[in-house]
Amino acid sequence: MPVFKSMHVGCRSSANRADRTDRAGGAEIVGLWFAVWHFGLAMLALLCFGLGIGLASVTAASAQNAVTGMRVGMVTIDEAPGLRLVVETVSPLQAQLSLLRDPYRLIIDMADTSWQVTTLPRRGDLSVGPASAYRFGVPQPDTGRLVIELAQPAAPVRAFVLPPASGGQRFVVDLVDVGDTAFMVAAAALKKNPVFSFAQIPADAKTASSATTAITRQMKLPKSKSALLSRRSAGTGKAATAPQTVPTRKNRRWVVFIDAGHGGKDPGAIGKAGTLEKKITLGAARDLAKKLQATGKIRPILARSDDRYLRLRERIRLARRQQADVFISLHADSAHSSKARGISVFTLSDTASDKEAAALARKENKADLIGGPDLGVEDPDAAGELLRMFQRESMNQSSQLAAAILAQIRDMPGGDRRGHRFAGFAVLKAPDMPSVLVEMGFLSNREDEKNLRNPAYISKLNQRLTTAIINYLTAYGPK
Ligand SMILES: [Zn+2]
């Protein structure tokens, strides 16, 4: 799908359910204004202004709430260009968000809400961040629907409401391209949680300040309508930026992020014979990468390919930036009891499955303390209810991945009895990516330590992990 489309071609090329319902409600549109402030690209992209004035409203008067304005702008989220959408309404908004694909789009259904807006066509181009077009209508009486078409698999990463400033109530959604897997996680989570109340204020102060800045800048209107309209006619309706090529699934491999535990000044566990966990995990990660690469279906990415220290959240950030389909963290820790041995597969949970799992998670999470105060990375815990909702969905997916791994290691030490376990591992807190931590064995156990130092054992385990990952992605990954 092209990134930028002219208003009419773009609208007709995407015949789908939302389109049809939009058309059905076409007579009810009063119009609205829509200013685009594209501050990543100087002098570009003020569009969608004027036209559509004076269309009669049929049922709008019966709705309790009304959209009185909308604005879009560009926000940068974790170094990726995103779309900020602001919907102004008379009363606080009850919005239901859905994500659909073919084409990728966000649908915002607003119960008991009409359109009381002026001077905007009910559909048009929207080349801001991941958005390519918009349209709005009334699919059924008293429901206002806004559809944002997306050139990439973008999902909302923040959604919140702001109290009235000079205008009405403001509902804010930030969308960013998160990759196919995170899109699927978000779509499934939104489907399961149709009634979702948005936080009154952004979850943390950093979000709040960026929101205020962006909105203030978006409030600047184009200098004159005529200048805007002449720019559009001269440019044949297309933005002046080169369209990006969006790779299709066919020519893309699944991305598996392999996180070798510990590194640098954090040695991890130390074995009875002096084996350092950080060395075992790095060797195993490299070998797993080779095996995954050899399948021809996977592009492996290593969190670290040398002996360096990485914070836990930095590992998550690197994986999300690569839009990984799977996050696998490799460890070989120690336990109080030297009898504890064998492979365990962990996923994230608020409550630990057992005391040993809780103790392991506590120990793993201490890796971050070695690096001193962490000021630079946004805490996934503070990212708000929307991401927590996605995280719950990705925890379900992580359990499927863990089950796929356990099915492959039944005949290996611990594989027959330790099973799937869970605890609050910080490194597994990616909100929108299936994540598992594989405890390859205990360096506090002599037999395990011997195995972990044996390349043949690591190779056998990695072969099993490779099969499990392929099985999981084939069943649940993006097609
Ligand atoms: Zn570890």
Image (cartoon, grey):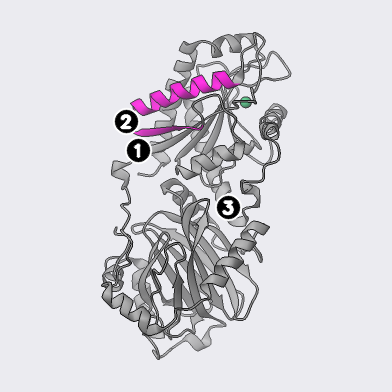
- Using the rendered view, name the quadrant where residue 273 is placed: top right
**Rendered position, 403 above or below 279:** below
The residues bearing labels 2 and 1 have C-alpha atoms spaced at a distance of 8 Å
Label 3 SS:
helix
What is the crowding at mark 3: few (fewer than 14 residues within 10 Å), some, or many (at least 20)?
A: many
- Tell me which segment is drawn in magenta: 278-303
Regarding residue 305, the answer to whether it shows in the image is yes
What is the crowding at mark 1: few (fewer than 14 residues within 10 Å), some, or many (at least 20)?
A: some
- Using the rendered view, name the quadrant where residue 295 is placed: top left
Type of the residue with mark 1:
Arg
Residue 296: image tag: 2
Type of the residue with mark 2:
Gly
Membership of 283 in magenta stretch: yes
Q: Looking at the picture, tell me which residue is in the foreground, 153 or 275.
A: 275
Where in the figure is residue 197, as x and y percent of width and height?
62, 64
The residues bearing labels 1 and 3 have C-alpha atoms spaced at a distance of 26 Å
Label 1 SS:
loop
User: Which of the marked residues, 2 or 3, is nearer the chain's N terminus?
Assistant: 2
- Residue at image position (51%, 72%) is 218
